[in-house]
Image (tube, grey):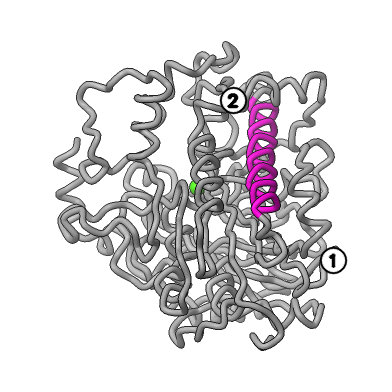
Amino acid sequence: MSRARGRTPNILVLLSDTHSACATGCYGSPVARTPNLDWLAGEGVVFEAAYCQNPLCVPSRQSLVTGRRSFQTGVIHNDMPMPPLRTIAHVLKERGYDTAALGKMHFIPDAECSLGQERHHGFDRRVDYEEFWEYLRKERGAPPLPGLPDDPWRLIHLEKKQHHLQAPLVRPDPVFRNTNHPHGTLDFEGHQEALVLREWRRYLAEDRTRPFLAFVSFQSPHPTFLPTPEILAQYDGVEFPLPLPPDENALRHPFLGAKAGGAKNEVRRACLRYYHAFVSFTDSCVGEALRALEESGHAQGTLVVYASDHGDMLFEHGLSGKTVMYENSVRVPLIARWPGRIEGGWRYGGLVELLDLFPTLCEAAGAPIPPDVEGRSLLPDLAAKRDGGKEAVFSESYPMQRNRWRMGVWPHRMVRTREWKYVQYGPERADLFHLIDDPGERQNVVADPRFAADSARLRRMLEETLGPLPRPEERLVSGRYERLLEAQR
Ligand SMILES: [Ca+2]
């Protein structure tokens, strides 16, 4: 699309955390109430098959903002600092953009490398954990936390401090008494989203001659699940069917089996209720952000994208949480709306990856696409209303030190084509699912000699894109960072 056809657009990226595509009305969920995302979907384009590059918070986000895969950013798990790579904000700033990242970006500070000086990564404006902590203390009366510094440059597990600060404001549900996550209710004002949306309205109200790139980024629906009481009440009486019990493949799986099963059905049902209510909370925040955009008069000239960093298993295959390559964990919602430039109200069935957003936003802004980014711009397909997509999409996951006992030491790598999903767990184990005949991923056919050629072809595709199987990740973690972690124990 040539820029001559319109003004340089504003760009709003609405990002959530842990929102599985399957838990969205416009993705066919029979129970999720997501009226604002459904509205956006009706106005824009819904990507049916969008995949994150690493189903874990920090690596997924750093991949999205740099347009590179995890093995290229080197940020392969949550405790790793963001290296000084160029982000989409650096590139668009050179094109004349005002850049802001309001809310959770999950840049881990590299205390030794940057001495705390670089937390912006190209964004002119940041509202981050330290602003939220100050907000909780000064405006919500959260008590100080002895033993935890206010300086985020001295903390690695930023969310942990947030949960501690929020705890006195939370009303936990007794059903979760004996679980790791005491899900419950929390009023809107106790959420990071309250501050982020307030700052977003302020940002929109400022006089600005330059176009903006703004990330408005929500912590929800990441656990702990803390919907407001009003939104939780919308799910009163809703029946949440439990997924099928884990299949043979999952139970016997050397890396997933130990994680399968566990929670009581009563707790699972309550978890699903709280999760979906928290998704509805996210949806209401999306609605509020879009209303603010509309009221500012900018909506017509703004490209809006909604995405999430990864999903959640929601007890499919007996699993909860993320980091695995099943659909609930790696497939994410992705919706784009650009009034007047992209025809709305249709669904894009082709395979796409979150790292395609980097070149897409560059092209929309009229900025040159850096030659070394991995993704492919979606704009030509969107402009032509053409359902293209990639031959294959990829995701990586590197078991962290603390879950090695069940996930092994080797990287888990996925390639997905229209027909197949192949997951490699180091040199010794792989899963192969035929997604057309087996969309639930319950028949692992990797040992079936009829599909040996398919397995070999998919393994080659993995190596061509992600390189040869790397050594266990312990050798990829820098000694510098290990020492920092050690100092905090
Ligand atoms: Ca996340």
Q: Quadrant of residue 318?
A: top right
Element type at mark 2: loop
The residue nearer to you, when weighing 33 against 183, is: 33
Q: Is mark 1 within 8 Å of ligand 1?
A: no
User: Does 282 lie within the magenta span?
Assistant: yes
Q: Position of residue 414 (x, y in %)?
A: 56, 65
Q: Which residue is mark 2?
A: 263
Q: Quadrant of residue 419?
A: bottom right
The residue nearer to you, when weighing 235 against 256, is: 235
Residue 69 visible at all: no
Q: Left or right: 325 with respect to 338? A: left
Identify which residue is drawn at 42% across, 61% down.
62
Q: CA distance from mark 2 to mark 1?
A: 39 Å
Q: Which residue is mark 1?
A: 346
- Mark 2 vs mark 1: which is more N-terminal? 2
Name the mark on residue 238. Answer: none
Q: Is residue 402 above or below residue 87?
A: above
The answer to whether the residues at label 2 and label 1 have Cβ atoms under 8 Å apart is no
Q: Residues within 10 Å of mark 2 (few under 14, many from 20)?
A: some
Identify which residue is drawn at 63% across, 53% down.
326
Q: Is residue 25 above or below residue 234?
A: below
Q: Position of residue 155 (x, y in %)?
A: 25, 41
Q: Which residues are magenta?
A: 271-296
Q: Quadrant of residue 31?
A: top right
Q: Amino acid at mark 1?
A: Trp
User: Does 352 lie within the magenta span?
Assistant: no
Q: Position of residue 294 (x, y in %)?
A: 70, 52
